[in-house]
Image (spheres, helix red, strand yellow):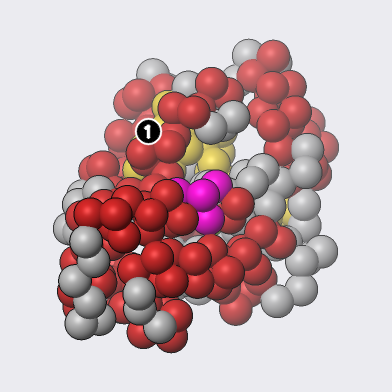
Amino acid sequence: MRAIVFDFFGTLTDPAAEAHRRTSFAGTAAALGIPLAAFWEAMAQSFPDRIVGRYGDTRQTLLTVARHCGAEPGEAELEAAVAAQTAGAERVRRPRPGALDLLDSLRAEGLRLGLISDCSSELVEAWPSTPYAPRLDAAVFSWQEGYRKPDPRLYATVAERLGVAAVDCWFVGDGGSREHDGARRAGMRPVLVTNAGYPGVDALRSDPDSYRPALAIDELADLPALLTA
Ligand SMILES: [Mg+2]
């Protein structure tokens, strides 16, 4: 094994932070002058298209979603909505306790580190300024690539950018988006992070993986022990 490819949400990020998503959306909805329930529903419905870039950047996305909800925000409203959405996204992606230190120590051991994330525009736009960016050698985003997990091209792309063969990669994720089945098919060794210490997070996982990897850990902090086992 020469490289580890991570999932982002619920794996490197704090699973408890998912609870902030609704509050975050409330700020955006208020800025757009839309009821939260309508905005929430429109964002949920558009999720599959948003994460493969079909709604464009965050500004374009919010304008399209607002119009879908019957609103026509002006420039100032749209600007405030983008700011609210951007700030909310930052709260939702706060690092899991210990995750950044873990990445640093894995890298210090000479491992190449990569990321595959099914994500919408907010993460890609903010990525260079996040604490994750300098710690990962390659980051592959569905929004940028135009396809989502478990599409084999995402796994091939991250391996290529890491400069390693897929069979030399482990894939570590919390099991959304059928990501482990995709990793297995790509030749990577899948590792499930169960998040057993975060009751209720299963319900937040989209398109959960029916394939359960042989290797599973409850916490990301358990990964080093698994690597040396
Ligand atoms: Mg995840």
Q: Nearer the viewer, residue 129 or 207?
A: 129
87 in the magenta segment: yes
| Quadrant of the drawing holding the C terminus | top right
Residue 224 in the image: x percent, y percent? 77, 34
- Compared to residue 193, the image places residue 135 above or below, namely above
Q: Residue at x 42, y 49 (%)?
A: 83
Q: Which residues are magenta?
A: 86-90
Residue 75 in the image: x percent, y percent? 23, 54
Residue 141 in the image: x percent, y percent? 35, 43
Q: Main secondary structure of the magenta part?
A: helix
Residue topped by disc 1:
158
Q: Is mark 1 within 8 Å of ligand 1?
A: no
| Quadrant of the drawing holding the N terminus | top right
88 left or right, relative to 220: left
110 left or right, relative to 24: right
Q: Residue at x 23, y 66 (%)?
A: 73
| Residue 62 visible in the snapshot | yes
Q: Secondary structure at mark 1?
A: helix
* Quarter of the rendering containing residue 110: top right
Q: Nearer the viewer, residue 188 or 118?
A: 118
Q: Residue at x 25, y 81 (%)?
A: 69
Mark 1, other Cα within 10 Å: few <14 / some 14–19 / many ≥20: many
| Residue 52 visible in the snapshot | no
* Quarter of the rendering containing residue 17: bottom right
148 left or right, relative to 56: right
Residue 91 in the image: x percent, y percent? 60, 51
Q: Residue at x 39, y 19 (%)?
A: 163
Q: At label 1, which amino acid type do we have?
A: Val
170 left or right, relative to 185: right
* Quarter of the rendering containing residue 71: bottom left
